[in-house]
Image (tube, grey):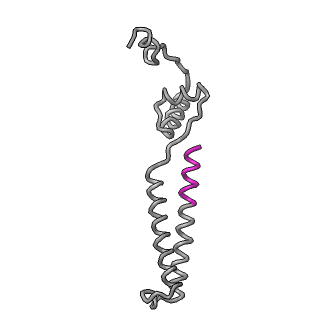
Amino acid sequence: MSEKARKNTRRSSAPIKVYCTPAEREQIEVNARKTGLTRSSYLLKIGMNYRVTGIVDNQQVERLAKINGDLGRLGGLIKLWLSNDRRTKELGKETLHAVLGKINDAQHEMIKIMAGIIRHKG
């Protein structure tokens, strides 16, 4: 690497100081963590008018995937029941209503998780 190329790196350039209160610093740190960036990278992107996007919490994605799997299994059970499959011969309307209730609960849980992700992102 040439001497000129080494001089034009960010690390070899002078930093910009930003004066802020402890509360403002904490908020900047929280915002940077939400996006998965360092404070420096976060502030640089904002200062250069780049779009800063957040990362989605992996735990929330795992919860959504689990709920999606549960919905698939419940849907399969209803399909068997509707097709008069011998394995569901013993299932009555009460069971079907319980399954539909679980699907409704799962949908509400998904909406709650998605709303939480959106609130934390912004």
Q: Residue at x 43, y 89 (%)?
A: 86
Q: Residue furthest top?
A: 3
Q: Position of residue 51 (x, y in %)?
A: 59, 34
Identify whether 121 is placed above or below 21.
below
Q: Which quadrant does the C terminus fall into?
A: top right
Identify whether 13 is placed above or below 67.
above
Q: Position of residue 43 (x, y in %)?
A: 54, 27
Q: Residue furthest left?
A: 1
Q: Position of residue 103 (x, y in %)?
A: 53, 72
Q: How many marks?
A: 0
- Residue 72: say if magenta: no
Q: Residue at x 58, y 48 (%)?
A: 119
Q: Residue furthest right?
A: 49
Q: Residue at x 52, y 30 (%)?
A: 42
Q: Residue at x 54, y 35 (%)?
A: 27
Q: Which quadrant does the N terminus fall into?
A: top left
Identify whether 58 is placed above or below 95.
above
Q: Position of residue 59 (x, y in %)?
A: 44, 53
Rendering quarter of residue 49: top right
Work out whether residue 4 or residue 115 is closer to the camera in this orientation and state it. 4
Dominant secondary structure (helix, strand or loop) of the stretch shown in magenta: helix
Work out whether residue 19 or residue 95 is closer to the camera in this orientation and state it. 95
- Residue 115: say if magenta: yes
55 sits to left or right of 118: left
Work out whether residue 107 or residue 33 is closer to the camera in this orientation and state it. 107
The stretch in magenta equals: 111-122
